Image (cartoon, helix red, strand yellow):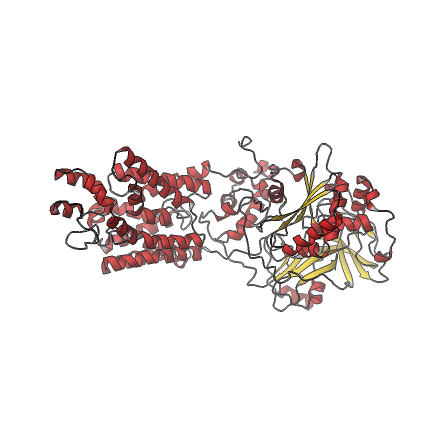
Amino acid sequence: MFSRFGWGVHPPESKAGTKGLKFINLPIPHTCYIPLQQHVGAPARLVVNKGDLVSEGQLIGSADGAISAHVHSSIPGKVADIAPVLTVYGPQTAVIIEAEGSFSASARQLPTGAWTDLSGAQIRDRVRDAGVVGLGGAAFPTAVKLSPPEGKKIDTLVVNGAECEPYLTVDDMLMQTFPEAVIEGTRIALAALGIGSAVIGVENNKKAAVSALKKALAQLNPRESIAIKKLRTRYPQGAEKQMIASLLGRRVPSGGLPMDVGVIVQNVGTILAIRDAVAYGMPLFSRYMTVAGKAIARPGNYKVRLGMRLADIVEECGGFVEEPAKIVMGGPMCGVSVPSLDMPVVKGTSGVLFLTRKEATHAEYTACIRCGACVAACPMNLLPCDLGNAVEKNRPDLALKLNPRDCIMCGCCSYVCPSRRPLSHFIKLAQERTKPDTVAKA
Amino acid sequence: MKEKEQREQMTLVSSAPHIRSGESVHKVMWSVVLALAPAAAFSVYLFGMPALVLIGVSVGSAVVAEALIRLFLRKPVTVLDGSAVITGLLLAMNLPPRAPCWMAAIGSAFAVIVVKQLFGGLGFNIFNPALAARALLMASWPVYMTTAWHRFSGDNVLSPALLNNGGLPPAVYDTLTRATPLGLLRDGPRILADAGLGSAPLYKMAVSPEMLKSLFMGNVGGCIGETSALLLLAGALFLLFRKIITWHIPAAYAGTVAAAAAVYYYATGCPCWQMMPLFHLLSGGLVLGAFFMATDMVTSPVSRKGMLLFGAGCGIVTFVIRLWGGYPEGVSYAILIMNAFVPLIDRLTKPRVFGVKEKARP
C-alpha cells in the first residue's frame, strides 16, 4: 500500500493554510493578459486582431504544429492590444482583452449525445479543440499525450493526485469536491487511449480525498478497472517516474518516457479539464489553483480565469498582511519565482505563493562538506554534490559523466544541503553546458 | 510614480526550490560539539584538572590557529562555524590526559593550518585533521603519547574498579595494571610468560564483569576520549537522531571488528572467545572513532554503499593493527588510511541512476 521510491525528502507540508478550504470563484478581472504560449511546444498562431470583439471561450490562438495547443479567450470583450507580456515562461506575445458584453460560454450549446458514443479519435479532437494541457505544472498538450505513437503499447493510465508539493491543496480539493467527475474524466481518458485500466495515486496525507474517490467509485461502479491507491507522503512522490515506480513497480528507463513502460500519466486537474472538454464542450479558459503563503491576507483555493494578473488576485485575496519576500508560481519545491505582480495566470499555474522572508529561506552558500545528504535524497540516484562541484569548477566534461540529464529538477538536493548550495540550479547549468553542441565547441 | 514604487519593492528571484530544510553547517558542527561534551566532561571528572586544561588548550589553539591562518590567507574568518572547535576537541580526546599542553597546541595548529586550511579549508581536506595531528604527535613524541596516562592509585593505569580475583601474584598483577586495556591485551601474554604463567588469566581478566563494566561506564585509563562508551553512545544517538550521522559507517566499522575478533579468538582457541568481541568494541578509541571520527563528513564517502565499505575497511585495518601492529591501538591509523581510499571508494560505489539497467552501465 505504501509503495516507495529511493529516498526523497519530507519538507514541512505547510498545507494547513488552505487545506479543506472550498473553492471560491474569483471575480472576473476587468483585463486579461492571455499569452499565446502557455504550453510545451510551439506558440499558438494568433487568429484575432486588435479591436476585435471576442466572446467568452472564443479561439484566439490556434495550435501551430504537431506539439502545440489552442488558446481561448477567458472573458468576453474587446482585444485592446496584442503586445509582449512578461510571463512565467519569459516574454510572450499576449492578447490583452478588456471585458465587455455578456458571458456566453455557459449559454452556448452543449455537444449533442453522450461521450460514450464517441470514438477515441473524436475524444482526442475535443480535447485538442478545448486547448487542454497538463495542469499539474508541466503544461504538455494533453491531446498529444493521449495519442501515443505507433508501436508504443499503453496498458495503464495513471491519474496523479499525489500533490507532493508543500503548500498546494488544489488537487486535494478537486478530488474532494468533484470525485464523480474525476472518475468520469478517468473513464473518458481511458476511452481516448482505448484501454481499460487506470490507477489513481493519492498521498496518504489526503484521507478525505481518498475516501471521497472511493465512495464515488463504488457508486458509479464503472466497467473499466479503476483503482485508488494510497502513496507514502514523500516528496517527489508526484514526479512521473517516481509515481509509476511506486504504483506499478515499473522503472521508466533513463532518457525514456512513461509510455516506454506502457503508462500515460495525467494530473487530476487535467482529468477534470478533459471531462469538461469532452462531455461539455468547455474550452480551457479557467483553472483551479491554490493561493497561499503567510504574506497574503486570504489564502485559499480559487477558480481563476486564465490571463488574470497576480496583482488582481492579490487584490481579491485581501492584499498583503506582510510584504512578500518571494512570489512563486507553482509549488515551493519546483515552482518559478517571479519579480512582479504583472504576471498573468497561465494554464500551468497550479498555485501562487506569497512567501514571507521567514518562509523563503535564502542564504549565501558555502563549500560542499561532502555530507552526502543530497546523495541520499536524490530520487534519481545522482550525485548532486559532485555535479555541483563540477559546474563550479567549470568542468562540463566531468559533469557529463554524472548524468545531469537524468535530473528531474525536483530540488531535493538543494533543499537538504547544509551548505545551502543551489545544487539543482548547478545541475540545470550542467544540463545547459553539456548540450551536445556546447561540448563540441568547448 | 507607481512604477518606481514597484521597482523598489522588487521581490527575491532565484531558482527553485524556494524553501530549505533549515539545516546548516553551523548547526551540524555545533551539534557534534554538543554530542561530544558529556564524554569529555566525564573524562575531566575522572582524570581531573590536567584533562580540562588539555582540552582548553587544544580547542583554544585550534580556534586561534584557524583565525590567524584565515586572516593571513585574506579569507573570511570562519571560526564560528564550529569546525575548528571540533578539531581541537577531538584532538584533545585523542591525547593521554597527562600529555603536555604545548603538544596539544602544536597538534591543533598542525591540524587546522596544514591538514585543513592549506588543502582549501572546510570541505576540501583529505584527512581527518584531528587524527592527522595525532599521527604527527605520535611520530614526534611517542613517549608522551604512550605513557602520559592518568594513574588511579600507585601505578594503576588500567582501572580502579578491578580486583585481583584471578589469583595472580601481586607483582604480576601490578605490572599488568600499568597498561591501558589494549596495552594489557598486547603486552599481557609476554608479562605472564615472563612470570612463567599461561595467558588464560589475561583473557579472563579482560572479559571479567568488572572490566567490561569499567569499559562501558568509563572508569578506565586511556586517552581523554577513550573512557565512557556509554556517554559516547549517548552523544552518537543524538547525532543519529539529528540525522547528522547515519548508522552505516559505525555499524560496518563495529560489525567488522566484532566479527574479526570472534573469528580470530575462536581460531586461536581462546577460552572466552565469545566475549572478546565485546572487549574489542568497548576498549580503546573504537566508539569514539566509529561514531565521531570515521563519520567525519568531509573525509568519508558520500553514498550509503560507500559508507559501508569505508566502515568495513576501517574495521579490518583497526583489528590488524591491534593484533599485529606496532601500537596497541589502531583506530586512528585505520581511519587515516581509509581516508586516503575515499575517492576510490566513491568511484567504485557510484549509485546506479534510476532507470539504468545493470548491464547498460558503461
Give the residue displayed 63% in from the left and 55% down from the top: A207
Q: Position of residue B84 (x, y in %)?
A: 36, 55
Res. B329 image quadrant: top left
Residue lying at the far top in this picture: please name it: B359
- In the rendered image of this protein, does residue A255 appear above or below residue A286? above
A137 or B240: which is nearer to us? Answer: B240
Height in image: A258 above or below A215? above
Quadrant of res B42: bottom left
Q: Split into 4 quadrants, where in the image is the N terminus of chain B? A: bottom right
x and y, in percent, of residue B131 in the image: 32, 47
Q: Is residue A187 visible?
A: yes
> Percent from the top left, x then y, of residue A442?
56, 38
Residue A349 visible in this rendered orientation of the protein: no
Q: Position of residue A184 (x, y in %)?
A: 76, 48
Image check: B143 left or right of B64? left
Say whether residue B331 is left or right of residue A57: left
Nearer the observer, A221 or A293: A221
- A372 vs A253, left or right, is left
Q: Judge by depth and name the residue closer to the eye, B265 or A125.
A: B265
